[in-house]
Amino acid sequence: MMLIFLFTEKLLFLEFFVGVLIGYVHNKIKLSYLSGLIILIIGIIFLFLSLSSYIVAIELDRFFIWGIPSAFIVMGAVYCKPIKNSLLFYLGNASYSIYLVQILTVPGFYKFINYFKIEINNELLSILCLFSSVIFGCFFYSFVEKNLKINKKITKEINS
């Protein structure tokens, strides 16, 4: 990590490090649900503050603008009381597929918008990219990832 820090101007790699740190802290320190909720709310407030034109004008690294608020949100969510909701449970299971397909859906959506010369503001475009990534990720999860898990389990049983 220190070697990367010495040779880069961007602090994006620190977001991964902070995620590891959150996992470590969660295993070592037990906080109350209320503490988790407070940390989560602070993260959400920081994230909304990052939308301020004043913050954008400062030209801070994305690690400070989005990484730190995101770290607060993740840290708070880890300690919050779990919500039992089938849609959220499904999205949690599909989250890795959503992560995998977003690398294709976001640029694909931008190319679609540019090809058809559709005028759209960036905020709406971001929301549409988010929803398209979630939809395609869920499709991928339901029809590819789940089937791969089932086939792997069957293969393991046959070989046993």
Image (cartoon, rainbow, N blue to C red):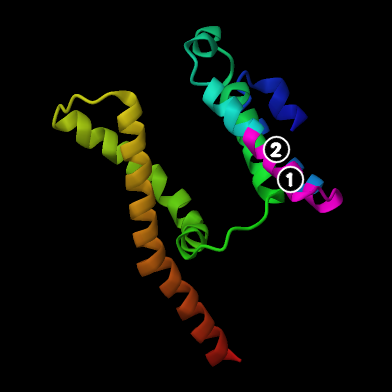
Q: Horizontal and vertical percent for residue 98?
A: 44, 52
| Number of numbered labels in the structure image | 2
Is residue 6 covered in magenta?
no
Depth check, front residue: 43 or 12? 43
User: Which region is colored magenta?
Assistant: 26-41
Q: Amino acid at mark 2?
A: Ile
Local crowd at mark 2 within 10 Å, few (<14), some, or many (≥20)? some
Residue placed at 72% from the left, 44% from the top? 36
> Residue reaching furthest front?
34
The residue under label 2 is 38
Is residue 38 covered in magenta?
yes
Q: Is residue 56 left or right of residue 63?
A: left
Q: Horizontal and vertical percent for residue 151?
A: 46, 80
What label does residue 34 carry, if any? Answer: 1
Residue 119 in sight from this viewpoint: yes
Q: Horizontal and vertical percent for residue 91?
A: 47, 58
Residue placed at 83% from the left, 51% from the top? 30
Depth check, front residue: 87 or 14? 87
